[in-house]
Amino acid sequence: MLIGYARVSTTGQDLETQKEILENEGCKKLFVEKVTGTSTKQRAQLYEDIEFAREGDTLVVTKIDRLARSIMELKRLIMAASWDF
């Protein structure tokens, strides 16, 4: 299953564009939030997304910075999720 994650950090940004792109790509489930990306600790929908995902699922984002702001942060997310690659 394709699972989408969309995030904006300010109220002035548009979630609808990200949601539309993810739906057009075939995502069957979307996790959406308006929260700063400076820390993953406050991103409840991200962690729900990680918990929801099962073996064989694919996480889809419109841009990598919607998921993680650095390679180290991405690595921490992967380790926390215990995903196998």
Image: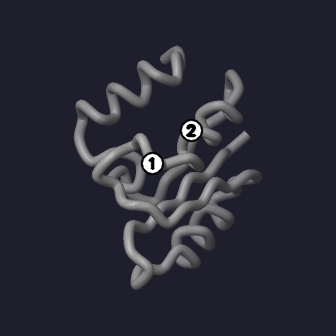
Q: Report x, y in % for residue 65.
A: 33, 54
Q: Report how far apart the C-alphas of labels 2 and 1 lie in the structure.
A: 9 Å
Q: Is residue 48 above or below residue 38?
A: above
Local crowd at mark 2 within 10 Å, few (<14), some, or many (≥20)? some
Q: Report x, y in % for residue 60.
A: 54, 48
Q: Is residue 55 above or below residue 58?
A: above
Seen from this angle, which residue lies furthest bottom?
A: 12
* Residue 20 as seen in the image, left or right of residue 71: right
Q: Considering the numbered disc 2 on the image, is that residue within a helix, a strand or a loop?
A: helix
Give the number of the disc on residue 47.
Answer: 2
To which residue does mark 1 refer? 42
Local crowd at mark 1 within 10 Å, few (<14), some, or many (≥20)? few
Residue at image point 27% right, 48% down: 69
* Residue 31 as seen in the image, left or right of residue 84: right
Between 76 and 71, which is closer to the camera in this rendering? 76
Residue at image point 28% right, 52% down: 38
Q: Quadrant of residue 57?
A: top right
Between 70 and 23, which is closer to the camera in this rendering? 70
